[in-house]
Amino acid sequence: MAAKQQPPLMKKHSQTDLVSRLKTRKVLGVGGEDDDGEIHRSKISQVLGNEMKFALREPLGLRLWQLVSAVMFSVVAVMALIFPERLYDAVFDEDGSSSKTSVRLYGGALLSISLIMWNALYTAEKIIIRWTLLTEACYFAVQFLVTTIPLFESGALSQGATLLLSSRGLFILISVYYYYQVGRKPKKA
């Protein structure tokens, strides 16, 4: 008996088959949207950590503000560590020789915060930038309150203290502004 001859196999061209192309793209994760509306380029780029969801669209002036903050924290920390009397005298307009230790401890804490600010300057991660901005805003708010209460108790408001309070209020506003700008979801085009 002669064997039946099979019909020739037809090659499937996936380039022309729309359903096959869509299935392939779905498996690879190319062009699909997630719950946030972000479009992934591929599963491979997601696994390797090159996901566009975490890309930060920075508000104008954010990096400059981070640099100014880091420099400011560092300078005040060094001043508090080296010249504690002068820093105390500039703020409270009285002799601070009895509070050298506390001002130096303050300088050490500021130096630690400045290291965090310097490291946040070089990161692109949105959550780290937001936490440092929140830390900065909380620090300025606490410093504003701690400086204001003794000044109003004594009834003497020096020119240095007025400048310090107004600058701290401005720094609170700037830090909170950037905190909310970094946290905003980008507008979809």
Image: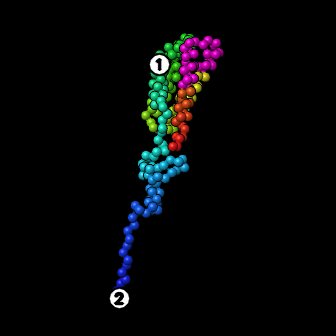
Q: Is residue 21 magenta?
A: no
**Residue beneath the point at 63% across and 19% down:** 149
Tell me the amino acid under the disc marked 1. Answer: Met
Q: Main secondary structure of the magenta part?
A: helix
Quick one: label 1 or label 2, which is nearer the N terminus?
Answer: 2
Q: Which residue is mark 2?
A: 1
> Which label belongs to residue 71?
none
Residue 112 to residue 38: above or below:
above
What range is drawn magenta here? 146-172
- Dot 1, how many residues are within 10 Å of its Cα: few (below 14), some (14-19), or many (20+)? some
Residue 62 image offset from top left, x and y in percent: 48, 31
Of helix, strand and loop, which one carries label 1? helix
Q: Does the magenta portion include 154?
A: yes
* Cα–Cα span, label 1 and label 2: 103 Å
Residue under label 1, please give it: 79
Q: Which part of the image, by quadrant, shows the N terminus? A: bottom left
Pick the front one: 84 or 162: 162
